[in-house]
Amino acid sequence: MTVKSASSRGTDGGTAPKFAPALPQLSDFSLVSGGPLYQLLRRTRLSDDELQFTSRRVLVVAMIAWLPLALLSVMEGNGWRSGETLGFLQDMEVHARMLVAIPLFMLAEVWAHRQIPPVIRTFVHDGLVTDATRPSFEAAIDSAIRLRNSVVAELLLVGFVYAVGVAVVWRTQFALDVNTWYAVVDGGLLRPTMAGRWFAWVSMPIFLFLFLRWCFRLFIWTRFLWQVARLDLDLEPTHPDGLAGLHFLVLSERAYRPVLFAMGSVLSGMMANRILYTGAALADFKLEIFAAVVLLLLTVLGPLLVFMPNLRNVRRRGITEYGSIGQRYAREFRRKWIGGGQTTSEPLLGSGDIQSLADLHNAYEVVDKIPMFPFSWRNLTLPTVTVLLPVAPLLLTTFSVEELIDRLLGMLL
């Protein structure tokens, strides 16, 4: 994994790429516009090539995943809480999954479809991909598209949803051990109701499939970036973004914010159920909240870590190159103006030598400050807030509104 030296740039001094940046497939590359489900949505007019009709898709999925649960629960007398039974309308977690997370998963597709392609095109438009690496770059795009369109991959996701997600994970880790609208505890076992059967075989698989499909897309994104990072990218150590020209990659995180908010909502709904109906406290979930934030941050920003070797190499090269030229320039400057080994009649005031020395110092400082990671602590703030925002209302289970206001004012003042 290497980066090209500054001398390998074009004859224009590195201000433009050496080839025309017209790559037709770049405008077609999308993490989300492919696969069997995408084709099904297009044929049923729930989507078009640009993933429009989001509200139509959300309404149809809600009618399949949420509405039957409400109707069956009411028919079975479990629409509202009765005695020790948790009613459907009081189940915060199911509403968070079906009415918040699923629509946000669909909205995230539109965001990703609009925001990821410009990030990909920047590799070409900014000249990071050269004539020599262009075929490999195109091959990485083609490989990502084939994986995105894989029928086998989505079938495996469906199989995993039913074999593991519903049958094992949800029943053992997330289902409440109390009587609910979806199951009754009988001898230590959960006996599903009619609504519970629809929930287990239709609603929950829809949620899990959409979630796992996003995990699969993030795997495709990570794999693509890893292949690009292995190319001989033409990085510039003194690029003013402080990341050798790679700062644009951080913009990809914006495409996944709806997914982050969706998972924060699911976490909030799960905790709300346990706080309100099983006697748990918000403080009991500190570890879960911390783990969720860390895991989700790694999910959306972790793919960028594949460029750490590139940043290390370009920093090392930049220090060598600019250190060498700095040494020569500083020595000549000292000889001309201080050392006395050479005389000059040029006036000191107004001389460009001093400004050039300062500019060279600034360039070396930019190179020396190239970080190890392709993002800063500041880039972690908004994703973290996005995850935690749905959890914030649960603070009212611990503090009153007045106490929260007093604590916030105390922090600010």
Image (cartoon, rainbow, N blue to C red):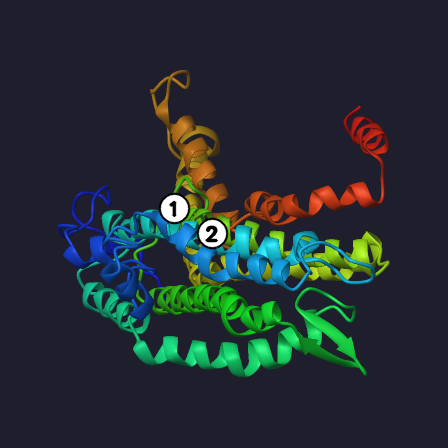
Residue to which mark 1 is pinned: 55
Res 324 visible: no
User: For residue 225, which quarter of the picture?
Assistant: bottom left
Looking at the rendered structure, which numbered label has been put on residue 24?
none
Q: Note whether 187 is above or below 200 in the view shown.
A: below
Q: Note whether 75 is above or below 185 in the view shown.
A: above
Answer left or right for 23 relative to 394.
Answer: left
Give residue 314's position: percent from left, percent from top. Answer: 41, 57
Per the image, label 2 sits on a secondary structure element best described as helix
Quadrant (top left, top right, bottom left, bottom right) of the N terminus: bottom left
User: For residue 8, which quarter of the picture?
Assistant: bottom left
Q: Are marks 1 and 2 in contact (CB under 8 Å)?
A: no
Q: Residue at x 39, y 39 (%)?
A: 332
Answer left or right for 95 relative to 22.
Answer: right
Residue nearest the observer in this picture, 402 or 320 = 402
Q: Residue at x 65, y 64 (%)?
A: 76
Residue type, label 1:
Ser
Residue nearest the observer in this picture, 81 or 315 = 81
Task: Of the two numbered discs 1 and 2 on the same chain, state the one appearing first in sequence.
Answer: 1
Per the image, label 1 sits on a secondary structure element best described as helix
Residue to which mark 2 is pinned: 103
Residue type, label 2:
Pro
For disc 1, the neighbor class at 10 Å (few under 14, some 14 to 19, many from 20) is some
Task: For marks 1 and 2, give the CA distance.
Answer: 8 Å
Q: Residue at x 80, y 26 (%)?
A: 409
Answer left or right for 343 relative to 75.
Answer: left
Give residue 54's position: percent from left, percent from top. Answer: 36, 48
